[in-house]
Amino acid sequence: LRRLRSFCNITAVSVENVRFDTQKMENPEISGVEYQQGELHGYEVREYLLEKFNRTCVYFGVRDVPMEVEHIVPKTRGGSNRVSNLTLSCQPCNQKKGDQTAAEFGYPEVEKQAKVPLKDAAAVNATRWEIWRRFEATGLPVEVGTGGRTKYNRSVRNLPKTHWLDAVCVGQSTPETLNINGMQPLQIKAMGRGQRQMCDNDKYGFRRKKKDGTFASPRTVKRVHGFQTGDMVKATVPKGKYQGTHIGRLASVRARGAFSVRTKSEMVQSNYKYCEVIQHADGYGYSIGDVFSL
């Protein structure tokens, strides 16, 4: 956030720092009318179940079809609406199961899987207040949202599922009308600065040896003619197989000046003389997304 504020006029922060609201999933009654009758009814539960069961029917194993929230022990048999009694199934399986329990339907393992504690969600939620405190320390207004809220905001506005549109829809303050037609997002991804391993290992896990039997020297940061691996460059190749202008990231730099440039579609070979630095490697990857149109 400090880095972005150095060149953007950021006036407020909306952050999705919890994937699910476990309180609403485990005991919906304590959340009152807002949860039971409000606009977010069921979103936290459905989103959690989709993640937990990998968007797959637990009975038939089918994917990429509409899923229904299904009671492991039917309500007619005393089952509750708690998340530990809910799972996912396709419509044919749900209808075929009827008022049987999952065990009676031939899937006793489903009940065991559903009762696994919400430790994955709880682990993420445990960091929420520390994240909030650090954002608050910047002095900006901070709004905290969940994945269920983000999904709801995106769904009611009929927006496709993309990372940048999810970011637009974080939090309760998301405007009813979003003026995003014609927008072209700058997408920033944390890439790291290479790996910490100092030298390559063989298939047995031992340090590789050179042909003369000595051990390979540790890796060092290689800079050739002002370029290093990870730099974003524009390579203007005057002739040959890769003739033309290419924009991408340096995949490798060689002492003799021959570089490999990874573009969106291919690996291009170029000499350093034809390369121009656009962005020095800083641990992040940058790309321009497609123009959005409704």
Image (cartoon, grey):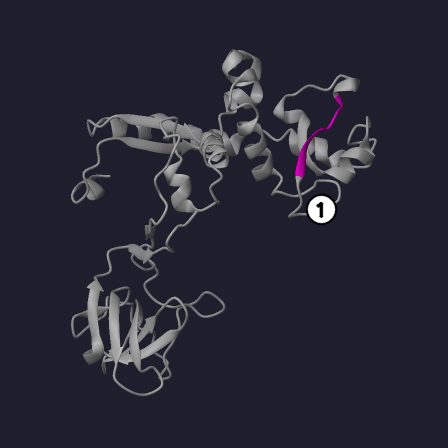
Please tell me whether residue 137 belongs to the stretch shown in magenta: no
Q: Position of residue 10 (x, y in %)?
A: 21, 36
Residue at position x 37%, y 54% from top? 291
Q: Which residues are magenta?
A: 67-74
Query: Which quadrant of the structure image shows residue 82?
Result: top right
Front residue of 33 and 50: 33
> Which quadrant of the figure has residue 206?
bottom left
Q: Is residue 260 left or right of residue 275?
A: right
Q: Nearer the viewer, residue 214 or 100?
A: 100
User: Residue at (40%, 43%) from the top-left corner?
Assistant: 165
Main SS class of the magenta portion in the image: strand
At 74% from the left and 20% from the top, the residue drawn is: 75
Residue 44 screen position, x and y as percent: 53, 28
Please give the count of numbered marks on the rendered protein.
1
The percent position of residue 112, horizontal first and vertical second, equals 69, 32
Secondary structure category for the residue under label 1: loop
The magenta stretch spans residue 68: yes
Q: Crowding near pointer 1: few (<14 within 10 Å), some, many (20+)?
A: few
- Quarter of the image that includes the N terminus: top left
Q: Position of residue 277 (x, y in %)?
A: 20, 67
Q: Is residue 140 above or below residue 225?
A: above
Kind of residue at disc 1: Gly
| Foreground residue among 234 and 251 | 234
Q: Nearer the viewer, residue 272 or 166?
A: 166
Q: Which residue is mark 1?
A: 61
